[in-house]
């Protein structure tokens, strides 16, 4: 994370429970009772807890909705794509990743990470350029899921996709003009889903790297879904198919 701060009750609590390294925790004066779990975990781990004014919390969170608590943490470490794939296989599972192409909105990125965690994806891949990186706003939007779902940052998405294909993953991209709907193909094996930006979709080079493009049906007046919603639709179709496959074994 760029400035080493997490704010909001749930994100701070999730980070503490996940064992994230904290330098200190600031809480609003008089809130120790309502923040009992946060305070107890911090003190249990020897993390200094300081009661401060609301103005101090506003400054520490950059004006964000801190809900009375801000934590100062060591920077979030991005991971290697190869490590994500290896960890999934080490757990005896088919790798399942989401690749983001041109997602610049922190709220969308946080939403994607949160859904990735809920749907059982093993990791999220983001580009070093042309995309949002993990920030306090992303951590908050993810509701703490950044502590559990690895994020890999790559300099070249096309090369990262080539690596995934070499590792046996099937790469499925989203495109409103695709000839297949998202629920038609078998999505139970090693898989990477590519989600493009709401305005521009998937870039040409990344699109060409996909093994298959799928569409989400749209019958209303708007022409597209935002990235977080589109990913949620696909993620739960994948989870549904994989759950059925496990039950039938």
Image (cartoon, helix red, strand yellow):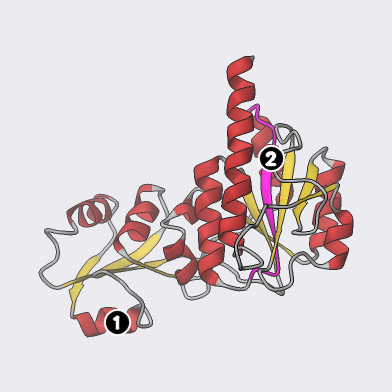
The residue that appears at 29% across and 82% down in the rendered structure is 58
Quadrant location of residue 61? bottom left
Whether residue 1 is visible here, answered yes or no, is no
20 to 53, vertically: above or below: above
Give the residue displayed 11% in from the left and 58% down from the top.
33
Question: At 10% across and 69% down in the image, what residue appears?
Answer: 30
> Which residue is at the front of the view, 197 or 87?
197
Instruction: Write down the region rendered in magenta.
Output: 92-103
Query: Could you tell whether 68 is left or right of 208 in the image?
Result: left
Q: What residue is drawn where x is 80% and y is 58%?
A: 177
**Residue 47, horizontal then vertical, whole percent:** 29, 60
Tag 1 residue: 58
Q: Which residue is mark 2?
A: 183
Residue 205, label in figure:
none
Pinpoint residue 237: horizontal percent, then vertical percent: 61, 40
- Is 94 magenta? The answer is yes
Against 247, is 72 above or below? Answer: below
Between the C-alphas of marks 2 and 1, the distance is 45 Å
Q: Position of residue 28 (x, y in %)?
A: 18, 72
User: Between residues 168 and 243, which one lies in front from this camera angle?
Assistant: 243
């Amino acid at each position: 994370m760029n400035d080493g701060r997490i704010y909001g009750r749930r994100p701070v609590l999730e980070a503490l429970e996940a064992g994230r390294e904290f330098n200190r925790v600031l809480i609003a004066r008089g809130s120790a009772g309502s923040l009992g779990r946060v305070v107890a975990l911090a003190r249990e781990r020897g993390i200094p807890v300081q009661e401060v004014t609301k103005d101090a919390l506003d400054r520490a969170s950059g004006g964000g909705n801190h809900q009375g608590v801000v934590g100062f943490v060591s920077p979030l470490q991005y991971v290697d794509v190869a490590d994500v794939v290896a960890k999934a296989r080490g757990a005896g599972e088919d790798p399942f990743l989401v690749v983001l192409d041109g997602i610049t909105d922190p709220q969308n990125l946080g939403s994607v990470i949160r859904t990735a965690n809920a749907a059982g994806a093993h990791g999220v891949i983001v580009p070093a350029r042309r995309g949002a990186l993990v920030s306090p706003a992303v951590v908050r939007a993810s509701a703490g899921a950044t502590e559990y779902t690895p994020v890999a940052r790559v300099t070249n998405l096309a090369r990262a996709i080539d690596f995934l294909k070499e590792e046996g993953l099937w790469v499925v991209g989203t495109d409103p003009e695709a000839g297949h709907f998202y629920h038609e193909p078998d999505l139970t094996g090693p898989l990477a889903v590519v989600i493009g930006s709401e305005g521009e979709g998937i870039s040409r080079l990344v699109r060409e790297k996909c093994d298959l493009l799928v569409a989400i049906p749209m019958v209303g007046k708007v022409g597209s879904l935002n990235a977080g919603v589109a990913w949620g639709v696909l993620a739960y179709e994948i989870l549904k198919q994989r759950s059925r496959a496990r039950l039938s074994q």
